[in-house]
Image (tube, grey):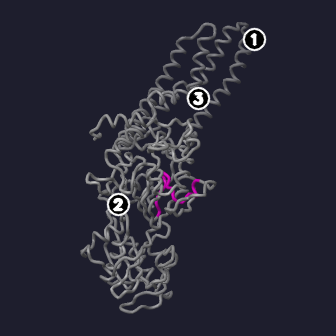
Amino acid sequence: MLPKNRSLFKSALHRVKEFDPNVELTQVTGARDWQAAPALGPRSSDAALQAYASMTQTASLAQLQTSMSGLTPEEVLVRLKIRGPNLLSTVKPPKWWQLLLSILPNPFNILLVLLAIISVATPSPSWSTFILLIVMIVISCAVRFWQEHRSTVAAIRLQASVSTNVRVRRQARGGWAEDVIVDEKTLVPGDILLVDPGDSIAADCMVLETSSLQINILTSLTGESEPLRKTSAPQGGKEDCGLFELENVLFMGTSVISGSATALVLRTGDDAFIATIMKQLNKKRPLNSFQKGIRNVTYMMMGFMAVMVPVVLIVSGKVTHNWAQAALFSVSVAVGLVPEMLPAIVNANLARGAFALAKKKAIVKRLDSIQNLGGMSTLCSDKTGTLTKDEIALCHHVDPSGEKKQEVFQLAWTNASNQSGKKNSIDSAILEHSSIDKNDPGYGTKVAEIPFNFETRRSSCIVRTPTNKLLLICKGAFEEVSLLCTHVRAGDTVVVLDSNRRQELIKRAAAFNADGYRVIAVATREIMDHDTNDVDPSEGLDSNMIVEGLLTFLDPPKDDAKASIQRLQELGVEVK
């Protein structure tokens, strides 16, 4: 809904102008404009992000005319009207005429056009040959254009039906702040974005508050896998450092490995830094094996023509002494060397494959990909949601000897309930399985936490027990957690985790795995108060722990999973 004062809304639109990429940024004095650049210099994503990174949080919020409580719904609508949706133009579908122009310059089509022109340019023009070649070109291009245009329209509809939601902080009508779930397309500069483990960053942001935040930035932008730790400290005095070295800036397209944060949205859509990279990557699509094959066949035909036509022309002219007839005969030889129906036949077969896949709810945007699909030898697919229902449920909570034990579940519930941010599937399964009162503090009150990390595959929390002791509770993948344990609980006593007991524990976990269960280990350790006073409490605390027990989870298979696997095996596809 637009603001009630339409004149104010129109004046705001007229007052705020879009930046031209070739115009230098100027700093606004007096009444600040949220679109004004934060610093002098050429307008570029990296320059603006460098400037924001050196500013204090208060200055950045003032620059974008927002607050920690977020924007009002009316202000979001105004900024969305000015900036447009948070989309990259590089992923927008091509127009129909652009698609048609991309189809026409096919090597084989160019060869046929050349032959068609030669057939009417020589003496005694052969219009029947000209018409035949042009018809073959039209049929070939029409089949490809129809299929790819139809697939593009279907892909647009599919993308419109799928949306990615993000969590933001907005001002409610009473003036108080509330966390709401919105479509990432509606993000605008000045929004307060809340990120959790596993989230994909939907815009270029500045970190305002953070809790052990690690971003997998280099995997998305440079191909490397080393995560970066992010902080909320201003990066003043680091103007000469690289853009990726700014510790308080989050980039669109990167993902959160661990931790959580509150961030200020700086740039969206085509203003984001990744947009400049996407434009460079999408300039020209490399040729696939099928296109290279068509090109090589065309070159081979042209080579034959370059050799045979002059030879036929010279030999026929010398023998008959009728050079006009010899030229016509040489053109006929050139036309005969080229299979005019080949483009139409190839495109018709590819279109037939695309139509068959369409019946199975698969969209083929480019016909050339059909050949790549047929030449595939190995397909890697995640089973979650494909063969399974993606509904993880807690099945067992046992001690190291395999006996059911409520204390193991109580420890796991305390860990899961004290994880901040969005709960992952394991935490959700534990909390949903629980019959414990949500107000129950469990083993104690939370003091600190070590968020889940996709590399270490474990999460921990530190609680203060009723006896005023600090207890670290860790849960995570069995392999990783068990390697960090030196003792194991046997009944009411704690014994050393020697090689024999470790092997028994490994066999018990392997038996659960063989039955299709996912095994999570639960471990504890008593720590001292001074251990939590470090700047980074996550370093070394979750070690030398005691194995308390195991949790098992199951993601049940879909009803038709067995039939699907049997059908794949009948088709000669091995499922591993």
Per the rendered image, the range of residues in magenta is: 243-257
Q: Name the residue under label 2.
A: 388
Q: Does the magenta stretch include residue 245?
A: yes
Figure quadrant of residue 107: top right
Seen in the picture, residue 561 relative to 394 is either above or below; the reply is above
Q: Does the magenta stretch include residue 152?
A: no
Q: Mark 3 points at which residue?
A: 107
Question: What residue is rendered at 44% in x and 91% in y?
Answer: 495
Q: Is residue 399 rendered to the left or right of residue 110?
A: left
Figure quadrant of residue 549: bottom left
**Residue 29 location, x and y as percent?**
49, 43
Distance between mark 2 and mark 3 Cα atoms? 45 Å
Q: Name the residue under label 1.
A: 318
Disc 2: CA contacts within 10 A as few (<14), some (14-19) or many (>=20): some
Q: Is residue 41 rendered to the left or right of residue 456?
A: right
Seen in the picture, residue 149 relative to 187 is either above or below; the reply is above
Amino acid marked by disc 1: Lys
Question: What residue is rendered at 55% in x and 51% in y?
Answer: 51
